[in-house]
Image (spheres, helix red, strand yellow):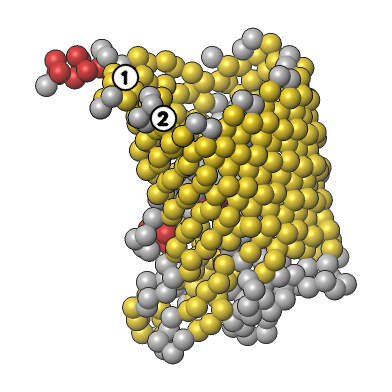
Amino acid sequence: MVCVAVSAAAQVTVKPYGFVRNYFNLDTRKTYTVIGGEYNMIPYDEKMESGVDVNDVAHAQLQALTTRIGLNLEGPELLGMQSSGKIEADFGGFGTNNTVLRIRQAYVKLSSASESWNGELLVGQTWHPLSGDIMPEVLGMAAGAPFRPHSRTPQVRAIQYFGSIGYTAALLYQLQYMNNGPVWDATKNDYVSSNSTDFALNALVPEAFLGFNFKKGPWYAQLGADVQMLRPRTHAKVAGTTKKVDETVTSFTPTLYAQYVGGMWSVKFRTLLAQNTSHLNQLCGYAVTGVNADGSWNYAPIRNTISYLNIAYGKKVRCNLFLGYMKNLGAGEDLYDFGTGNYRIYMKGGTNFTNLNSIYRIAPSISYNVKAFNIGLEYEWTACTYGDIATDGSIKNNDNLHQVANHRICALVKYNF
């Protein structure tokens, strides 16, 4: 057994890679962040206490989180195709008292460029097809989120090309990036908003993506759609008793992506009509629209239009501009009122952003790149409009509609190997 393993291992080429990355961040307002504050999403709404907005607080930090290490594996031919794999991790997970190593990617892949099969078959954890491994060139670690879908997840994915035309098809399961939903809290004797993989995994049906691709020279484009089913609750509390319920919510998210990467230029654009994409680190979810006699709930996904444009130019000195926009369109039907405007909306960030109307972001940056060394400076302006929730989950256009903004300065020092 050992000899066979050694013999097989001898046929695999291992190429290590990675980087040491340090960030300095300065924010003018309290913002919703993850991974120690480096992964910046949006500023919180005003929170007034005795006439003082307690979220109007500046914050600065320097951290080396997300320093990364990976292994690219190249193996022998199998079934006439080239075998390969990847293992990738970084210091971006959090334990009780310290930062811990987390898995980013771990997959095996068979690929071929022959006339009979020009494509690849991948099994394992890697970027969600809506994320892609082609991303905006922003310096901030959020890589364009919440405007760019951001998720790495276990999947089975096939890509095939017929000349310049091809397709991408994938079945996906959740792990690190998950949806929000109702979880029973015995201390409150009620359901609270929380993140869990159970909402997707209990539905049994995997998330599915299908996209049609065009690739020629510096041009690449994709028109696709993602379908996801959740089972928010398996049991309900009715008059002090527990009953089994059968309830699901299905979302459909079409997308268009296009890019030009040639010479000194890079232009990338994506737009989505997003439904319940909280598992993609977007501020989009679903809501309860009805309560039935058997204790089950009806749901509808909240719809959002989400887009970004990224333009970069240069090589050693590279200039970049990122523009992002998101608008809450509501559920398209009335939500169920649990009492005096108490709507149950489940989304990224829990109940903090159920009254979010829109988000704007402008983020110019400049970087200096020489050999293995990168330094850069980025300014990021993110503005959100908040207001009162309408009966369909959209936001009312009244006098309470207001804007809050955060100004972030991000400085990067990175050494690649």
Residue 237 in picture, x, y percent from top left: 41, 81
Residue furthest to the left in view is 1
Image vertical order of residue 234 relative to residue 223, above or below: below
Residue 132 in picture, x, y percent from top left: 54, 38
Image vertical order of residue 154 relative to residue 397, above or below: above
Give SS at disc 1: strand
Labels 1, 2: front one: 2
The image quadrant that residue 285 belongs to is bottom right
Query: Is 238 in front, or is 401?
Result: 401
Locate residue 263 relative to residue 203 in the image: left or right: right
Residue at the (85%, 73%) spot, across then down: 398
The quadrant of the picture occupied by the C terminus is top right
Residue at the (49%, 38%) spot, across then down: 166
Give the amino acid at mark 2: Asn
Which of the two discs, 1 and 2, labels the residue nearer the N terminus? 1
Image vertical order of residue 220 relative to residue 337, above or below: above
Give the amino acid at mark 1: Gly
What residue did someone put label 2 on? 118
Q: How many marks?
A: 2
What residue did someone put label 1 on? 75
